[in-house]
Image (cartoon, rainbow, N blue to C red):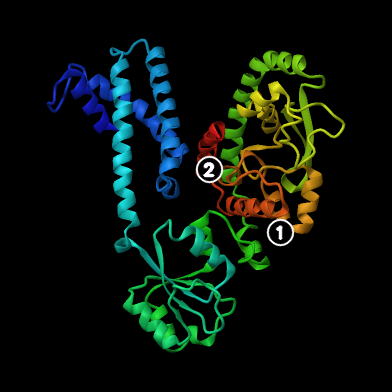
Amino acid sequence: MYAALFLALAVRYRDFSALPGPQTGQFVFHFSIIFSVWLVLLFAFDFYDIFSIKRIIVFWKNMARFAFLALGFGVIYFYLNVAALIVPKTILLLITVFFVVLAFLWRRALIIFIGSKRFAKKIAVAGWCSEMDELARDYLPRLNYEIAAVFAPGSFSGFEKMKIFSDPRRFAAELEKEKVETVVFAAKTAPEIFSRGPLAGALLKMEVIGAEIFYEEVTGKISLGLVGEPWIWEKLFKSDRKNYNAVKNIFDAILSFCGCVLTAAIFPLIFLAVKLDSAGSVFYVQERKGKGGKVFKLYKFRTMASTPDQYLVLRANDPRQITRVGKIIKKLHIDEFPQFYNILKGDLSFAGPRPEWNKLADDYEKEIPFYNCRYLVKPGLTGWAQINYKASVTTGEAQEKFEYDLYYIKNRSFWLDISIIIKTLQLFFR
């Protein structure tokens, strides 16, 4: 960012000295403030996510969105800051353009570096499971992990190109030869050879990590196939985290009050638009399950035609039912604004597992293991699952979203909440 700033000043003033232009100090001061917001925008659009920066199409789509918002914020900043001694219209544009070019070049170099086999992170796997299939196929290649060896004394259905060993001595020798630092333990049971003999000695020299932990670190979700009831009790049913909850409640109260003020300001316009477009109530009210399984009423601005069976779950996005005004306010996510009142009441938080329609939640509790763990925390206006996964339609998709919810429940913190809220900005551009 600062390289783009000094390059823009040098080009604008045709001065390639150490401090180009007559007001370098003023530019550095004001753009330092602007750059702090740019950093937040870059985080929101996944520029610190290896998956995203390695996909060139995603990179340029997000970069275009970033450039638009970055320019917009710069314009607003200098328009409102009448005390500023500079009005850098051309320089703001130049800085944005130069930054986009420099960021692209830097990230291409970074991708070449992290994608090189020379810098691959070598791991070995003891045993195998279906979750390792998913990791080996969808995640590890993009993160530049290399599975150097697999110990599978029985039948093995893994990928053909892997080096598979059934002899513990040969497996131990391969670990040393390939200089493996991490062994992922994916066996359902622990054979005696892991605690005795040459393999036990080799494992003492390196990190041994359970498949459930490795899966969580790589994917950002928790596999229901790798955890059981003891894990649930140990990892989720912890202390109530009083300090975290206190800070979260204060944060929710302040922001939701501001959100309610904003909603009240635009309500007359929304009221007229919805009423003139279709018959029915301005609000849509649905019962959903919250913390402790308590049922509460969730409020939205109505976006669909008012019918006796309106908003049946799984058909909520039926384009034949959505109104003309509904398309606009849904696209801008304005239909969610009444939920600021739910947050102020204490039914919702800004970040947490998104609450399900109570009738659908009852079905999921029967079909998805440990689903009632969602009720350990307050549900959210947005959540970890919302920024990482699409809207669910089938039970299978609902289970995968729940695995993201489990990750949030286990790792919840104020900073994770902030990151979720920031990344929710992406939803406005989908």
**Dot 2, crowdedness within 10 Å: few (<14), some or many (≥20)?**
some
* Residue at image coords 75%, 17%: 277
Residue that extends furthest to the top in the rendered view of this protein? 82
Picture coordinates of residue 191 (x, y %)? Answer: 54, 84
Which mark is on residue 414? 2
* Circle 2: residue type: Phe
Q: Choose between 256 and 10: the one closer to the eye.
A: 10
**Dot 1, crowdedness within 10 Å: few (<14), some or many (≥20)?**
some
One can see residue 195 in this view: no
Residue 348 lies in quadrant: top right
* Secondary structure at numbered mark 1: loop
Residue that extends furthest to the bottom in the rendered view of this protein? 197
Picture coordinates of residue 380 (x, y %)? Answer: 64, 40
Residue depth check, mark 2 versus mark 1: number of the one nearer the observer:
1
Picture coordinates of residue 342 (x, y %)? Answer: 70, 32
Which mark is on residue 370? 1
Rendered view: 295 above or below 300:
below
| Precedes in sequence: disc 2 or disc 1 | 1
Residue 37 lies in quadrant: top left
